[in-house]
Amino acid sequence: MYWYLPWAWTSTFLEALIRTGPVVCTPLTDDDLDAAAELHSEAFDHSWSGDELASLLSQDGSFGFVARRVGHSGEPPLGFVLARNTKGEAEILTIAVAPRARRHGVGRLLMDHVLQHLHAERADSLFLEVDEENTAARRLYERLRFVEAGRRPAYYRQPDGRRTSALTLKRSLR
């Protein structure tokens, strides 16, 4: 890696750029919701429909971003994030990355856009929940300076019937 590349440009990001072409985030709109719902169903056992996503997106303070390869608007998105900011306290409602795009910087790109948006809105903090067994996501959130703020025991039901805890993570934005 060249010495002048920004620290955020990790080898995974560069690999994604080389293998799939540049990725861009744009605001999540109603036109994206069916594709986002399909992506959500690939990422979660209990997925949300396009109508459920539309309902969340229409709420005051809600916003989102969708990630796509540049010049491939007809392809399904690589990922999306839906968040809400209420009086300076924000939360990630959901974030999903397509299996084919995982570990290639798409989640980081989406989170960076959320953080930039919240910075512009002068939000104080950002919360999210993550399955304690989702080590890839936990590593990403750790790199983004999230800290554990709470735990919901036996919150998620795994496909094999086991229950795992949800970790509530917080990042101070001030």
Image (tube, helix red, strand yellow):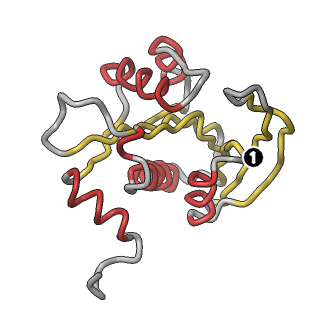
**Which residue lies most toward the right here?**
153
Q: Quadrant of the C terminus?
A: bottom right
Residue 64 place in picture, x, y as percent = 44, 36
**Which residue lies most toward the top here?**
51
Q: Nearer the viewer, residue 158 or 3?
A: 158
Residue 146 place in picture, x, y as percent = 66, 59
Horizontal side of residue 114 vs 28, given as left or right: right
| Residue depicted at x 30% and y 20% | 31
Q: Image height check: is 163 above or below 34?
A: below
Residue 93 place in picture, x, y as percent = 59, 34
Three-letter code, disc 1: Thr
Label 1: which secondary element: strand
Horizontal side of residue 29 vs 19, given as left or right: right
Q: Quadrant of the N terminus?
A: bottom left
**Which residue lies most toward the front here?**
160
Q: Nearer the viewer, residue 122 or 64?
A: 64
Residue underneath mark 1 = 168
- Label tally: 1
Crowding around mark 1 (Cα neighbors within 10 Å: few <14, some 14 to 19, many 20+) is: some
Q: Quadrant of residue 162?
A: top right
